[in-house]
Amino acid sequence: MATLAANEISRYSRHLLLPEVGKAGQAKLKDSRVLVVGAGGLGSPVLLYLAAAGVGTLGIVDFDAVDVTNLQRQVLYGTSDVGQEKTRAAEAHLNDLNPHVQVVRHSERLASANALALFAAYDVIVDGTDNFATRYLVNDACVLTGKPNVYGSIFRFDGQASVFCTAEGPCYRCLYPEPPPPGLVPSCAEGGVLGVLPGLVGVVQATEAIKLLLGVGDSLVGRLLLVNALAASFRSVSVRRDPKCPACGTREIRELRDYDAWCGASLPQDEVPEITPRELAARTARGEQLQLVDVREPYEWEIAHVDGARLIPLGALDSEWTTLDATREVFVYCKGGVRSARAVATLRKRGFDRAYNVTGGIVRWRQEVDSSLTAY
């Protein structure tokens, strides 16, 4: 077991006063290895608190760079970090917070090809991801490697947390056997998230990870914690292991798969024919009079919109589609392309055979056509 130096005893003195931790527990934390998948909204508080607590080795899996839009909730970074690799920026801040902690950077996308090898080197896996494909991948890799999965998710004002894949408890598939239909659930980039919410959920995840490492307290195994920031409510519901679960029940899943395809990362291409912003702008520049529809919300329209577009929020499309001309081409955009893809699929089912999704939405339009638009 690791020994604590004099300066570590001073640093962790408030832990050492707890009978449930003490010197032996703090040494156990120093010996522990935790892998955090995703260094974003959830990963930020998780990494900060695990580093402060003295977890000896912290692995970080993330392939992204810090963007200015991250700073509203990803408190691990500052303005000077914009443009840097998240893992590199995170390492610098965590080393400053606690130089006794070793940070291991995995600057790569978690995939079926590398997940098992990565997970095998750690004691606990913390899931701070923001998409269904990676959540199922984390879950199945945890089951196959026998590692506990400290799960969290956030959206708008609501969050969830639990501990999956332990010997006695359920896994993520027991709760959600199948991913939702593609395009049904927007991402935080499309739907928004209250900046403090990942802090609430991430701190819960960090707490659960520390309890698992110490072997103390009652964990969230078999319970799903539901957080509603608007109502200031925390409640939990029971989650039982499903004996028919292909991951932790029947053990049918013996290897990892192509999770992006299974989770339907996008709607089928034949349902949503697309056009790029550059192609659409070229047609507009030639003087073509085009039907351009923005299916975002009014507050998004006020931030930025494409000249000549008409605002019909996605929720209003069912009542306003009749005001469009089905004999002409219709081009639909949103922020990133998810909501507009759903809108195009809906329009085509109603006879709009010439409806097209503007790929990448207004985000890509700003990159390719008009950089003066405000980014959000």
Image (cartoon, helix red, strand yellow):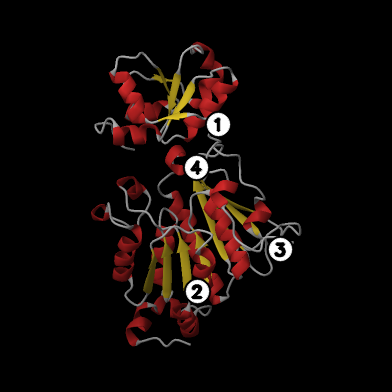
Residue appearing at x 52%, y 16% in the figure: 320
Closer to the N terminus: mark 3 or mark 2? 2
Q: CA distance from mark 3 to mark 2?
A: 22 Å
Q: Amino acid at mark 2?
A: Ala
Q: Nearer the viewer, mark 3 or mark 1?
A: 1
Residue appearing at x 58%, y 75% in the figure: 215
Q: Amino acid at mark 1?
A: Asp
- Labelled pair 4, 3 in contact (Cβ < 8 Å): no
Q: Is the residue 236 above or below the residue 301 in the image?
A: below
Reading the image, the residue beneath label 4 is 230
Q: Disc number at residue 270?
A: 1
Q: Nearer the viewer, mark 4 or mark 3?
A: 3
Q: Is the residue 268 above or below the residue 242 in the image?
A: above
Closer to the N terminus: mark 4 or mark 2? 2
Secondary structure category for the residue under label 2: loop
Q: CA distance from mark 1 to mark 2?
A: 42 Å
Secondary structure category for the residue under label 3: loop
Reading the image, the residue beneath label 2 is 121
Reading the image, the residue beneath label 3 is 251
- Labelled pair 4, 1 in contact (Cβ < 8 Å): no
Closer to the N terminus: mark 1 or mark 2? 2
Q: CA distance from mark 4 to mark 2?
A: 39 Å
Q: Nearer the viewer, mark 4 or mark 1?
A: 1
In percent of width and height, residue 349 lies at 60, 22
Disc 3 residue crowd, few under 14, some 14–19, many 20+, Cα 10 Å: few
Closer to the N terminus: mark 4 or mark 1? 4
Closer to the N terminus: mark 4 or mark 3? 4
